Image (cartoon, helix red, strand yellow):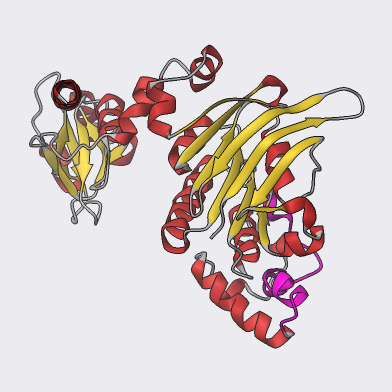
Amino acid sequence: MSDIEFRGIDKTYPNGTQAVSDLNLGIESGSFTVFVGPSGCGKTTSMRMINRMVTPTAGTITIDGRDIATTDPVKLRLGIGYVIQSGGLLPNRTVLDNVATVPMLLGQSRKNARTAALDVLDRVGLDRGLAERYPVQLSGGQQQRVGVARALAADPPVLLMDEPFSAVDPVVRAELQTEMQRLQAELRKTIVFVTHDIDEAITLGDRIAVFGRGGVLQQFDSPERVLAQPATDFVAGFVGRDRGYRGLSFRSADAVALHEISTVTVDEVATLRLDRGRWALVVDADGIPGGWLDVTGVEAVRAGATVADSVSAGGSLFTPDGDLRQALDAAISSPSGLGVAVDEAGAVRGGILATDVLTQLAEQRGREDAERGREFFEQGAQ
């Protein structure tokens, strides 16, 4: 693992454009640091300086205390994993040979490099059956996983990721983010990840560096503090008016009460008796939710419509590892006003009310205020 430090970094292009201005930043070994900001704010330029793909106009960058300007750039890059949009794969090489590229450049035999590449495919969740395919034969999400696999193949201590998930659809993007979290928990690389998406930054980062126009670092802090205590008006505006809602993702929902939900199977819908304003959740034989029915939906089924055409979408689900943000979203996105909590198998556990989530938030803040007060008086007593 490696520490990375920027000291007084400037980057001015020949046309006078100031891309990065007096950047001072320390990235801890084994951390997941996200550079975030609007287009043209210098975040990608700053990241690309780490592997000398961009040369700073002034200042010093060190990795483990060593000035990278004194290291051969080719040797430096071979020791740093690099992932870009759409994977940046070589179109004339198979998946396996794309992943084996860097180990072979480092001197491994083709046989050994390909054997190791299969293990890396396993690690990033790719079927070995894809090994002999070419990039054009893969989906966007698969290509991106291959790109991550190639970056990890030589087991580099540092991994640079330049908006790697921005070219895929939202569902695949969420899957790749989850996969990246799993990999980092397992491998503990020093990762620098660039994105323009504050939600992605909050989801992935241990620390977030928010860049503003002219490459000025506005704030470098934990996701919680960036949301709760923006350092500048720029950060507050970039994070958005709903930063309080985003901040709920760092709060536990373990104590939120679960309420009983009225459930019904597809076969029971036609005989269901519902009062006006009441709802029932349609579930299958395993208790997996399929949507909500009110009186109008039940009457439609009795008139000959299918259950599938009569249910209202159920909103988001609250999973066992969910936080207060997910709990509140489940409640307010449900047509019935009752969020659905499910177990690890996806079966219904109970219902969540938005009022209970807000009560839990108030209780947590009350305990935090009391703790801060206690610490203040203890420090005063000393």
User: Farthest residue toward the right?
Assistant: 14
- Relative placement, left or right, of 365 versus 26 is left
Please tell me whether residue 99 belongs to the stretch shown in magenta: yes
> Quadrant of residue 289 in the image?
top left
Can I make out residue 130 in this image? Answer: yes
Q: Which residue is drawn at the image coordinates 39% and 28% (left, top)?
A: 225
When the figure is inspected, residue 95 is found, relative to residue 359, above or below; the finding is: below
Q: Which residue is drawn at the image coordinates 91% and 24% (left, top)?
A: 15
> Quadrant of residue 245 in the image?
top left
User: Farthest residue toward the top?
Assistant: 233
Please tell me whether residue 139 belongs to the stretch shown in magenta: no
What segment carries the magenta color?
85-108
Quarter containing the C terminus: top left
When the figure is inspected, residue 222 is found, relative to residue 178, above or below; the finding is: above
> Quadrant of residue 120 in the image?
bottom right
Can I make out residue 306 in this image? Answer: no
The x and y percentages for residue 27 are 55, 44
- Relative placement, left or right, of 99 versus 70 is left
Residue nearest the observer in this picture, 286 or 195: 195
User: Farthest residue toward the front?
Assistant: 382
Q: Which residue is drawn at the image coordinates 69% and 26% (left, top)?
A: 215
Residue nearest the observer in this picture, 216 or 379: 379
The x and y percentages for residue 228 are 37, 22
Residue nearest the observer in this picture, 278 or 345: 345
Q: How many marks?
A: 0
The x and y percentages for residue 154 are 64, 70
The x and y percentages for residue 11 are 79, 32
Residue nearest the observer in this picture, 271 or 86: 86
